[in-house]
Image (tube, rainbow, N blue to C red):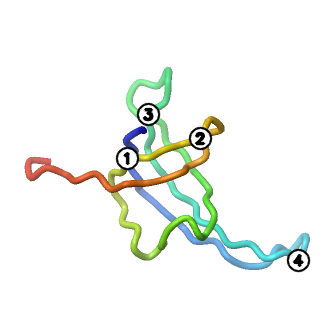
Amino acid sequence: MAQITIFGKVHRKGTSRKTGEPYDFFEFHMAVPKRGVVGESAERKVVDANFCDFDKLALGVYDADFDSDGNLLSLKPVQQSAGR
């Protein structure tokens, strides 16, 4: 499990001009720990629209699970202490 910060999100839904196929997914913009990086790395992760309730997902700090390919599997909000 890694601690990440989601600082941006977008819901993309529509029909591909190229194939005519529908699409529906979320993009999360996040700061994540990365081997070899001092500090954090800014990354964009794409997840299926069924991953979570987009409107209820607040920007902030989460404990996140990733699979071996780097795909986001789960998010759990981190409770911030009063001093932070």
Residue type at mark 2: give it.
Asp
Q: Is mark 1 on a helix, strand or loop?
A: strand
Percent coordinates x, y for residue 66 in the rendering: 54, 42
Which circle, 2 or 4, is nearer the viewer? 2
Residue identifier under label 1: 63
Q: In which quarter of the image is the N terminus?
A: top left
Which circle, 1 or 3, is nearer the viewer? 1
Residue identifier under label 3: 33
Residue that extends furthest to the top in the rendered view of this protein: 36
Taking depth in this image into account, of 79 and 82 the one nearest to the observer is 79
Categorize mark 2 by other alpha carbons within 10 Å: few (<14), some (14-19), many (20+). few
Q: Earlier in the sequence, mark 2 or mark 3?
A: 3
Residue type at mark 3: give it.
Pro
Which circle, 2 or 3, is nearer the viewer? 2
Mark 1 vs mark 4, CA separation in Å: 37 Å
Categorize mark 3 by other alpha carbons within 10 Å: few (<14), some (14-19), many (20+). some
Categorize mark 1 by other alpha carbons within 10 Å: few (<14), some (14-19), many (20+). some
Taking depth in this image into account, of 53 and 4 the one nearest to the observer is 53
Relative to residue 82, is residue 65 drawn left or right? right
Q: How many labels does the image show?
A: 4
Q: What element carries label 4?
A: loop
Residue identifier under label 4: 20
Q: Which of marks 2 and 4 is nearer the N terminus?
A: 4
Percent coordinates x, y for residue 83 in the rendering: 8, 47
Residue type at mark 1: give it.
Asp
* Label 2 with label 3: CB-CB less than 8 Å: no
User: Is residue 36 shown above or below 23?
Assistant: above
Residue identifier under label 2: 67
